[in-house]
Amino acid sequence: MTEGATAERGGRRGGGRAARRAAREGGPVRQHGTITRAIPNYEVLGEEGLALIERNADTILAEIGIEFRDDSEVLELWRGAGAEVDGVRVRFPPGLCRELLRTAPAEFTQHARNPERSVKIGGRATVFAPVYGPPFVRDLDQGRRYATIEDFRNFVKLAYLLPSLHHSGGTVCEPVDVAVNKRHLDMVEAHIRYSDKPFMGSVTAPERAEDSVNLARIVFGDDFVDQNCVLINLVNANSPMVFDATMLGALKVYARANQATIISPFILSGAMAPVTPAGVLTQTLAEALAGMALTQLVRPGAPVVFGSFASSISMQSGAPTFGTPEPAMVLYTAAALARRLGVPFRSGGSLCGSKLPDAQAAYESAQTLIPTLLAGVNFTLHAAGWLEGGLVSSYEKLILDADQLGMMQVMAGGIDVSPNGQALDAIREVGPGSHYLGCAHTQANFETAFYRSDIADNNSFEQWQAEGELNAAARANRRFKKLLADYQPPPLDPAIDEAVTAYIAKRKAAEPDAFV
Amino acid sequence: MTEGATAERGGRRGGGRAARRAAREGGPVRQHGTITRAIPNYEVLGEEGLALIERNADTILAEIGIEFRDDSEVLELWRGAGAEVDGVRVRFPPGLCRELLRTAPAEFTQHARNPERSVKIGGRATVFAPVYGPPFVRDLDQGRRYATIEDFRNFVKLAYLLPSLHHSGGTVCEPVDVAVNKRHLDMVEAHIRYSDKPFMGSVTAPERAEDSVNLARIVFGDDFVDQNCVLINLVNANSPMVFDATMLGALKVYARANQATIISPFILSGAMAPVTPAGVLTQTLAEALAGMALTQLVRPGAPVVFGSFASSISMQSGAPTFGTPEPAMVLYTAAALARRLGVPFRSGGSLCGSKLPDAQAAYESAQTLIPTLLAGVNFTLHAAGWLEGGLVSSYEKLILDADQLGMMQVMAGGIDVSPNGQALDAIREVGPGSHYLGCAHTQANFETAFYRSDIADNNSFEQWQAEGELNAAARANRRFKKLLADYQPPPLDPAIDEAVTAYIAKRKAAEPDAFV
C-alpha cells in the first residue's frame, strides 16, 4: 500500500454509538479530571546554560536592582530584609531572594466552590484557564466589537461547560459597558454565579483586590480563606525591572490574605527585554525572583507562582508576534528555572497574533500550547479563546482551543505499556494481511482508544460537501451557540447568593460610576 | 502593565528595511542551510518501556513472522540467511534482523545535482520534503480537482523556491492526465529539470524504479550512482506484517543500485495495527526491522531508513484522523527506537484531515510537525502541502507549512548562550523602566533576532482591515501565484538535458499508454 491510498476508508459505523454520544453530551456537565503529567519535561538548555542564566540574574539583582515605585511600605519591607534601598531602586545581596523564597509552597491547592473542581497548582499538575484581558470580543456573526458584561458572562458559562478547561479564569474579557470602578464586582460575581470552577481576583486596584477577597470570604468562609487558597491573581512586572504601585497594591492584599499571586514579567522581547532568549530569561528570572520574594516578606508561606509571559515583536512593524520559535525556547527554559527554584510555574497558552480564527491563529497557538505541555507549565492562562495578540476574546477560538486542550490532556498521560497497551494478543489474533477493525482487543478498547475531537471534521469529502463545506471556525460557531443555548447554572447556596448580591449592591452604592 | 494592554505598540518602522527585504527576495533563490539539531531529542518512554517494545517486536518476528508475497527471490534470500520460510511467511531467529542491519550506514548523504543542495540523512540532521502521493490538488481559485502534470511541475517549482524545503520530494501529486505506465518518467524529469534539490524515485513497479535509476545515472554518471546515494525511495509495508511484490520489486532495484530506501510501515491504528500506541510501535518495529534487514541481504551497506507513518482512525466514521495525541506518542517513541538501532528515521510532516487550509488543518499539522522536530526525525516527507488525509496537495497549505518549517529550523538551533546571547550589557545599558527598542544590542541584532514569517499578518487591526481583511489562506494564495510567476529554472547542463529527453522519448515509445 502506498501513502496516496488513504481514500480507502472503512464505512460509516454505528448508530448506537451516535446515541451513546448524544447521551453523554445531554447529561450533567462533563469535566475532564485534572492533569497529572506522566510524560517527561522537555528542556532545551542543559545544566550549564541554566546555571549561567541564574548567575546572570543574580548579577542583575545585585548590580542593577529592581524598582518598586510609589510604595514606601514595600521599600520598608525590603530595607528590613537587608536589601539596599536607593530611592525606589532596590538591590539585593546575593542569595537574599532565594532565601526568602524558601517559605513559599512548592505546590498548593486552589479550592473551587465545588470541591470536585479544586485544582492542584505545582508539581506535575497542569491547569488550563481561559483567555485573560481582551477589551474586544469577536464571533463570526457580529465580527469584532467592544466586550460587554454579557460577553463576559458568556465566556464564563462556556468555560464552565468545556470539560478541558479546569478553571474559570479572571478577566475573560473586559466588560467596557460597566463602570471601571465597579466592573470587578460584576466579574467576580459572574465567576461565582455562572461557574463552580476556581477563579481569579481583580488586580487593578488594592480596593478591588479587597473586594475580590471579601466576596471569596462570603463564598468560602473567613477562616477557610485565611488558611486556604481560593483565589489566584495575576501580578505583572512592568518590565524592564519595575513593579508599579497598582501591582504592588494587589500583591500585598492577596499575599496578606494568603491568596496566590502569579508574578509575571510581561515581556515583548526587543521592547521590554533584550532580543535574545537568554537575555529575556535572565531578566525574567531576576524580576520574578524579586516579586516572589516580596510576597514572602508580606506573609511567609503565601502561595506564589513564577510567571513568564514572553513573546517577540515584529522588527518591521513593532507589533507583538506569537508562535515563533524564540518564545518557545524561553518557555521551555523558564519552566526549568522555576523547577530549580521549587515553585509552581505559569506560562504559555494558545497565543496568536492573527485577527481571525484561521490557519495563522491555529499554527501560532499550537506553537505555544505544545511547548506549554512539554515544558511542564503548572498554570496556563490564555489556554483558550485568545485572538489578535490578546486584544480579542474569540468565541470560536475558545471552542477550537478547548479541543486542543483535551488532546494535551491525553498526551500528558503518556504511553500505556500494560499488557492491554502492548496488545501482543491482538497482533497474534489478527496476523499478517488481515485487519484489526473487529478483533477482540479493538472491540474492548475502541471507546477510549483515541482522542475524539468534537470540532474536527474527518468525514468523507462527499459528506463534508453535503453538510455545507464548513470550515473549522464555522463549526465552532455552531457549537458555542448550542452550548450557550443549553447552559444551566450550577447550584448555588441561596444564603451565599443573597450575601453576594447584598455585598455588591452596597459596594456599588458607595461611590459614583467612573469610566476612566 | 497588565496583559490586556498589548494594544500599545510601536509604530511602523523603516522603509529602508522593506527595500532590503525586497532585494533579498528578488535575488537568486534563497535556501536555508540544512538543519543540524542542537536541541535535545524528546522521548516519552523510558529505557524500560523501549526495551519492552523491542522484546515484543522480537517475539512477533520469531513467532508470527512477516509475509513476503509473490517474490520467490526474496524468500530465497531469507532462506539463505537462516530464516524459517513457510510458504510466504518468514520467521526470524532471535537477533537475525538486527545482525543483518549492522551493515547499514548510521547516516549518509543524498546528493543533489547542485552540490550545495545535497543533504545529510541521519544523526542530528533533519530534512524537510514536500507532500507525497495525493491524486487531487486544491487552491482557492479552482477548488479541489484531479492533479495534472502541470500541477506536478508547479509543486516542484514551488518546493524549489521555498527556502525551508531541503528536498524536491517524489510524487508531490499524482499527475492523472499522464498514462499510468509513463507518468513516472515525467515526474522524475520534472524533478531534474525544474529543481536542483535532491529527489525521490518511482516505486510503483520495478521497471519504473529502474527508469528512475537510469535517469539518475544520466544526471550523475554511472560510477557516481553506484557509490553514492542520489535517490531516496519510499517502500511501504502492507501492514499488518506483509510486504507485497510491488514494494519488494522496488526495494530490490534500489538496494542493488546502492540507493536509499525508506522502509515505512503505513499504519492507521485500529485498522492496520492495534488501537494502542505501544501495539502500533511493536508492530512497526517488527515490520521495519524485517524490511530494513532485507535491503542488507540484497546489498550490504545500501542506505536504508527506518520509516513510520502512523495515525489513528475515527472510530465513528472509520476515516483516518491526524494531529491527535496518540500518533504523536508513536512518533516520539519510534524515533527513539530508530536511534537504538543506529539507522536514520523518517516520520512526521504536516499531516491533517481537514478539507481546507483552515484552523483544523493548522492545528493538526502543528501537532505532527512539532513532534517531528522534537522527536529527532531525520527525513520528513509530507513536511508541506498535505491536505485532507493525503488525498489533496494544497497550493496554499504548501506555503503555510513552509513558513512553519522555517520556524522549526530556528527552533532546532537552540538557545545562544554566547555573551551576545546573554545580553547582560544590554540589560545594564537600558536599566529599569526604559525600553530596548533603540539600544546598541538591539540595533546590532535586530535583523536576525526573530524568525520573520512571510505569511503571518502582525500588522495593526486597522492596517489589516485596510488591506482587505485577508485570512492566512488568502495571503498564501497570493504568495504561491507570485512565486510561480517569478519562477526561473536552475541551470541544467545541455548534454544532460538532451540525454534525459532522449531517454524518456525512447521509453515512452516502447509501449502503448496504459490508464489502469
Image (cartoon, coloured by chain):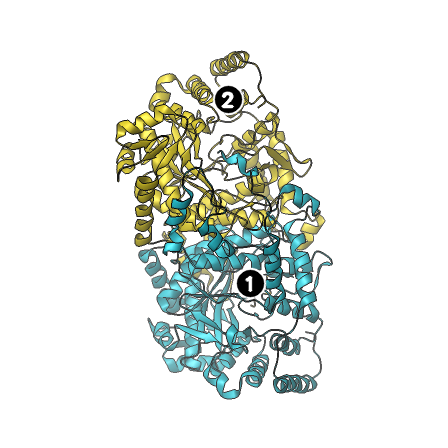
Chain colours: A cyan, B yellow
Question: What SS does tag 2 mark?
Answer: loop
Residue at 49% in and 31% down: B168
Residue ID for mark 1? A382
Coordinates of residue B506 in the picture (x, y in percent) = 51, 11
Coordinates of residue A49 in the picture (x, y in percent) = 34, 56
Give the answer, above or below, for where B401 lies relative to A393.
Answer: above
Q: Is B206 placed left or right of A18 in the picture?
A: left
Question: What SS does tag 1 mark?
Answer: loop
Q: Residue A29, labelled with which disc?
A: none
Q: Is B321 placed left or right of A189 in the picture?
A: left
Subunit bearing disc 1 = A
Number of numbered discs: 2
Amino acid type, mark 1: His
Residue at 40% in and 61% down: A38
Residue A88 in sight from this viewpoint? no
Residue ID for mark 2? B491
The CA span between labels 2 and 1 is 50 Å
Of residue B239 and residue A381, the one placed in the foreground of this image is B239
**Where's the N terminus of chain B, which quadrant?**
bottom right
Give the answer, above or below, for where B510 lies relative to B95.
Answer: above
Residue A419 in sight from this viewpoint? yes
Amino acid type, mark 2: Pro
